[in-house]
Amino acid sequence: MVSEQDRDYMRRLGEAKASSHVDTTSEHLRLPPIERLRRSFALSAALRGGANLAARVDDPSPFYEMARARGLYDP
């Protein structure tokens, strides 16, 4: 059985997470597109070593190649 106190705690936790996501998304959208792309590539590169590439269903490489070809991205 879940207590009302536990439900209240989880509700507050969910509200805090939702607020955090709104703040983070707003901050992200204020960045220029080139900075968003730089951060995206940096995150992708940083996590690539631990990724199970064989199980991946989407490959971001074509996205970055297209951005480079259009002069939008130069790592």
Image (tube, helix red, strand yellow):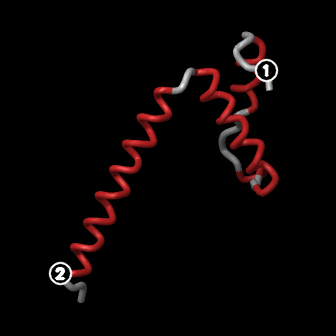
Kind of residue at disc 2: Glu
* The quarter of the displayed image where residue 68 is located: top right
Q: Quadrant of the N terminus?
A: bottom left
Kind of residue at disc 1: Asp
- Identify the residue at image location x=71%, y=35%: 41
Mark 1, Cα crowd under 10 Å, few <14 / some 14-19 / many 20+, is few
Disc 2/disc 1 C-alpha distance (Å): 53 Å
* Residue labelled with disc 2: 4
* Residue contact between numbered discs 2 and 1, judged by CB atoms under 8 Å: no
- Identify the residue at image location x=27%, y=65%: 12
Residue 54, x across and y down, in percent: 78, 51
Question: Tag on residue 59?
Answer: none
Query: In the image, is 13 to the left or to the right of 27?
Result: left
* Residue labelled with disc 1: 74
Mark 2, Cα crowd under 10 Å, few <14 / some 14-19 / many 20+, is few
Query: In the image, is 45 to the left or to the right of 17?
Result: right
Height in image: 1 above or below 19? below
